[in-house]
Amino acid sequence: MKARDRQGHVLELTRIAGDWSIDECECVSRTDRGTAVVRGTVLRSVDTPQGDVLAEISIKLLLEAARTLR
């Protein structure tokens, strides 16, 4: 899967935990530039800088991702 960052650069995403294919499923992916991307429930009541979001994911998914990265 591919995504774009704020500057328009293309990132290659590789799933390491969860499932991108299910519409409302949380997921963690690694990027080709050594970072991680999470898909989860956006928390809307928190003030964040423009362009930033906070996404909630389960601890179980986070631990699964951590085990994969070892």
Image: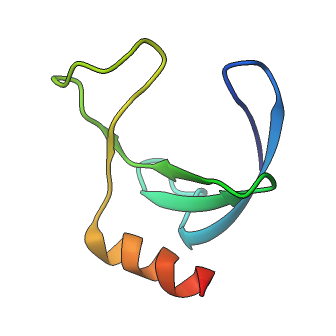
Note whether 20 is above or below 47 in the view shown: below
Count of labels shown? 0
Q: Residue at x 74, y 18 (%)?
A: 7
Q: Quadrant of residue 5?
A: top right
Its colouring scheme is rainbow
Q: Quadrant of residue 34?
A: bottom right
**In the image, farthest residue toward the top:** 50
Residue 28: x and y in percent read 53, 61
Residue 35 vs residue 1: left or right? left
Residue 13 vs residue 67: left or right? right
**In the image, farthest residue toward the left:** 45
Residue 50: x and y in percent read 43, 12
Residue 57: x and y in percent read 32, 57
Closest to the observer: 23 or 10?
10
Quadrant occupied by the C terminus? bottom right
Q: Residue at x 24, y 33 (%)?
A: 43
Q: Residue at x 78, y 52 (%)?
A: 33
Residue 62: x and y in percent read 39, 70
Q: Residue at x 19, y 25 (%)?
A: 46
Residue 32 vs residue 23: left or right? right
